[in-house]
Amino acid sequence: MKKIVIIEDVHCWMDGGTITLKMKKNESLFYDVEFVQNVSLTNREKSPLPGSLLLNNKEIEIRSKLETEILSEIKVAEFGVKILESEKELLKKIISEAVEFVESEEYIKVAEKVGRIK
């Protein structure tokens, strides 16, 4: 059975770059993926660590199988009907840049700076 992954909604936050994707897989599994901003590396209380990747508000382990699976799903995902045609190209670019950041060495450097890894 082919996985059908849909980005139902995209929220771009005004905090320096956090992006939340409202996702749906195989018509019934709903989940949120969040790329936490990596501009301000100051950790604020009760906020996720800068540069984190979250699944349903829980931090995903760096370079884990789950991280790879989530990024792969995002890469093949299609936009849902609520996404305006005029917004799709810009959103593709924003999402692609977020995925590229998580796959980069800079992601590891940010994780070290904010204490996600030692």
Image (cartoon, rainbow, N blue to C red):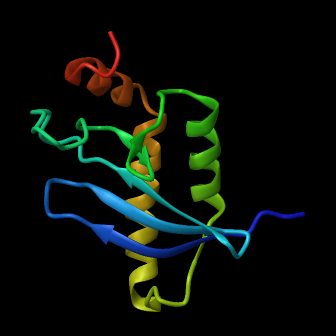
Give the residue displayed 57% in from the left and 57% down from the top: 74
Q: Is residue 8 above or below residue 110?
A: below
Q: Position of residue 110 (x, y in %)?
A: 27, 27
Which of the pair 56/21 is nearer the observer? 56
Give the residue displayed 47% in from the left and 27% down from the top: 62
Q: Quadrant of residue 46?
A: top left
Q: Give the residue furthest to the right.
A: 1
Q: Position of residue 84 (x, y in %)?
A: 43, 90
Give the residue displayed 54% in from the left and 67% down from the top: 23
Q: How many marks?
A: 0
Q: Position of residue 21 (x, y in %)?
A: 43, 64
Which image quarter holds the N terminus?
bottom right
Which image quarter holds the C terminus?
top left
Give the residue displayed 27% in from the left and 67% down from the top: 12
Q: Is residue 90 above or below residue 3?
A: below
49 horizontally vs 23: left or right: left
